[in-house]
């Protein structure tokens, strides 16, 4: 009986520690949201209070009225959507043949994609600036989409390759016997079987672009500026306007958190693929 | 269409795209590194051979930022592993009751480093930073101004790493947890029957079985940490007095603030080569044996 009691006690302790751990892990973000909901004047209060004395949307009002902010969020959305479409269009066919038609050239190709994932963004950003300038694509949506796609394509390739691993080669062969062309088998038979793989790859590409900072900092200045750049400017120009800044950070991150909440199992799966493959 | 032609055709768009937007820029980077060339006028350039490299390799500021980058990465990686792996062990201990815990831990997974940096700057900033007020209220520090997290040049590089640790512990915890649940249960049973206590089971069963997972985490996270830019930029912009300037930021400053495309390219090329060697080593030494 003693043993049983100590076992239960151990369980209680472990549960309490785990609970505390999770609580303290969530606390910083909860504080960000709670601050964004304070009246602007209360944000600078010393000592700070954890929860708002009174809930106010004043900071959100300020942020939305800030010059350039709605445009920056719109730019972020457009760039992320175009990056996602372009990288899927480019990466999915390549991933398909890399897995279902494996041969030396496709293995080399996947290795190349893996290597490009190691290139530091700044090493790519420096020459990309020069190239975009030459092409007249500085501070344009197209220029930023191309830059984002250069990192999204290897990511999408490796993710989709992992998903195609689950497709039996016999399926493609059967479709061919039934009269499909190779391309027809790919488009009409195999792709419709993997809506979730495509969706997760699209989601990862979208968020990679949505979160990207360095390329946007180098390649945009006014018109094509994205949300994180504007938030960073907020940070340096209005260094003390913490109220609106926390509101902007919440607007920028909350959609991502909600998506993660809904799709956490698939996202962890995708991250593990990413971790194992690159 | 022949099979071979089909394969080439399907690869073509990706190959073309990666050649134009990754391989060509990298070649251009290497090319620029041999010239005295300014950002405002890249067309006029003077061949200087290895002078940019000589400058880079003898630059005290660059050396300091390289060492700082290594310190930062080692510090962040160490705590991410300790906290992440610790959390994963806890979750595994309460296995079927840990669903909510893991959900909360998953939430920061996809958050931008910009948000993590901004958030922690807000927690650590002078005057209104709630962390110091909390520590002072608990009597751990004498007053809320006692630790100047982001303006003390001796500690700032570690202070900015806290945001990284917070953001990435979730990734380490969840990947480790997935690894832990894949260890066959009978291994633990066998160890238990042999009389191994919990600590011995951790040391002799869990850790060896987790070696490949930990290796992957170290490689992936280590490479990310070495490349860090935005998370630190939003907290300090590399300051005060370059005390939190990491390698990516040093290259960015050479290019944007000083407009020196040649120097920036040489430094970025060195960085790239270093990362490739590191990745290659990691692949051969750690990753491959666990797969073969």
Image: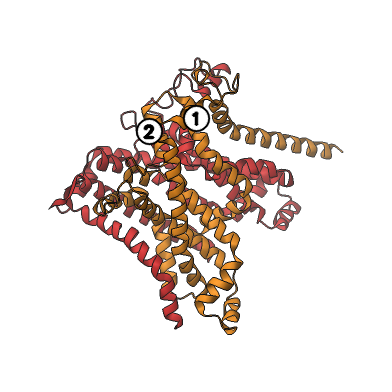
Residue at image coords 45%, 22% = B147
Q: Chain of mark 1?
A: A
**Which image quadrant for residue B250?**
top left
Q: Is residue B82 visible?
A: no
Q: In x, y percent, where is residue B161?
A: 45, 36
Residue at image coords 39%, 58% = A116
In this rendering, is residue A87 above or below A244?
Answer: below
Q: In x, y percent, where is residue B138?
A: 58, 18
Left or right, B94 with reference to A206: right
Left or right, B46 with reference to A28: left
Foreground of the two, A236 or B154? A236
Residue at image coords 27%, 47% = B267
Q: How many marks?
A: 2
Which badge, 2 or 1, comes first in the chain's sequence?
2
In this rendering, is residue B134 above or below B90?
Answer: above
Q: What hue does chain B carry in this figure?
A: red
Left or right, B191 with reference to B240: right
How many residues crowd mark 1 within 10 Å: few (<14), some (14–19), many (20+)? many
Q: Chain of mark 2?
A: A
Left or right, B266 with reference to B288: left
Foreground of the two, B279 or A196? A196
How many residues crowd mark 2 within 10 Å: few (<14), some (14–19), many (20+)? few
Q: Secondary structure at mark 2?
A: helix
Mark 1 = which residue?
A: A246
Q: What is the CA distance from the residue labelled 2 to the residue labelled 1? A: 13 Å
Q: In x, y percent, where is residue A209?
A: 45, 49
In this rendering, is residue B26 above or below B108?
Answer: below
- Location of the N terminus of chain B by quadrant is bottom left
Q: Is residue B60 visible?
A: yes
Q: What hue does chain A carry in this figure?
A: orange
Mark 2 = which residue?
A: A233
């Amino acid at each position: 009986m003693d043993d049983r009691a100590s076992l239960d006690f151990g369980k209680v302790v472990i549960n309490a520690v785990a609970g505390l751990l999770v609580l303290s892990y969530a606390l910083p973000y909860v504080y960000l949201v709670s601050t964004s909901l304070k009246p602007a004047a209360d944000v600078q209060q010393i000592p700070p209070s954890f929860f708002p004395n009174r809930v106010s949307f004043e900071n959100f009002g300020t942020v939305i009225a800030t010059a350039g902010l709605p445009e920056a969020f719109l730019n972020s959305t457009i760039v992320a959507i175009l990056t996602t479409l372009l990288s899927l269009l480019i990466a999915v066919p390549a991933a398909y043949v890399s897995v279902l038609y494996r041969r030396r050239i496709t293995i080399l190709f996947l290795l190349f994609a893996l290597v490009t994932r190691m290139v530091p963004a700044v090493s790519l950003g420096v020459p990309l600036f020069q190239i975009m300038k030459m092409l007249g694509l500085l501070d344009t949506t197209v220029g930023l989409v191309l830059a984002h796609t250069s990192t999204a394509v290897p990511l999408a390739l490796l993710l989709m390759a992992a998903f195609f691993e689950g497709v039996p080669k016999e399926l493609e062969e059967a479709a061919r016997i039934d009269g499909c062309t190779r391309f027809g088998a790919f488009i009409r038979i195999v792709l419709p079987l993997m809506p979730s793989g495509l969706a997760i790859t699209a989601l990862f590409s979208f968020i990679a672009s949505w979160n990207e900072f360095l390329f946007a900092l180098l390649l945009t200045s006014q018109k094509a500026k994205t949300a994180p750049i504007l938030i960073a400017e907020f940070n340096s120009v209005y260094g003390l306007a913490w109220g609106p800044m926390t509101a902007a950070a919440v607007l920028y991150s909350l959609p991502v958190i909600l998506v993660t909440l809904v799709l956490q199992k698939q996202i962890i799966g995708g991250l593990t693929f990413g971790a194992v493959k690159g | 269409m022949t099979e071979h032609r089909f394969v080439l055709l399907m690869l073509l768009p990706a190959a073309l795209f990666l050649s134009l937007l990754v391989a060509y820029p990298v070649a251009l980077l290497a090319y620029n590194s041999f010239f005295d060339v300014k950002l405002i006028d890249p067309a006029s350039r003077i061949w200087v051979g290895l002078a940019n490299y000589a400058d880079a390799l003898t630059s005290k500021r660059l050396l300091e930022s390289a060492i700082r980058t290594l310190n930062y990465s080692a510090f962040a990686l160490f705590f991410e592993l300790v906290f992440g792996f610790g959390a994963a062990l806890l979750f595994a201990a309460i296995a079927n009751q840990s669903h909510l815990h893991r959900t909360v831990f998953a939430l920061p997974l996809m958050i931008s480093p910009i948000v993590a940096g901004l958030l922690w700057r807000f927690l650590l900033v002078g005057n209104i930073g709630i962390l110091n007020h909390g520590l002072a209220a608990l009597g751990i520090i004498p007053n809320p101004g006692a630790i100047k997290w982001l303006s003390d040049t001796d500690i700032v590089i570690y202070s900015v790493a806290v945001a990284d640790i917070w953001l990435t512990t979730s990734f380490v915890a969840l990947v480790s947890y997935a690894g832990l649940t894949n260890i066959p249960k009978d291994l633990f049973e066998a160890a238990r029957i042999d009389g191994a206590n919990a600590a011995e089971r951790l040391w002799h069963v869990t850790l060896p079985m987790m070696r490949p997972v930990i290796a992957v985490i170290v490689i992936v996270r280590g490479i990310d940490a070495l490349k860090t830019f935005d998370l630190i930029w939003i907290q300090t912009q590399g300051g005060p007095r370059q005390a939190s300037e990491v390698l990516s930021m040093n290259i960015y400053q050479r290019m944007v603030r000083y407009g020196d495309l040649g120097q920036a390219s040489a430094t970025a090329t060195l960085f790239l080569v270093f990362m490739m060697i590191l990745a290659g080593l990691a692949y051969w030494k750690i990753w491959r044996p666990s797969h073969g």
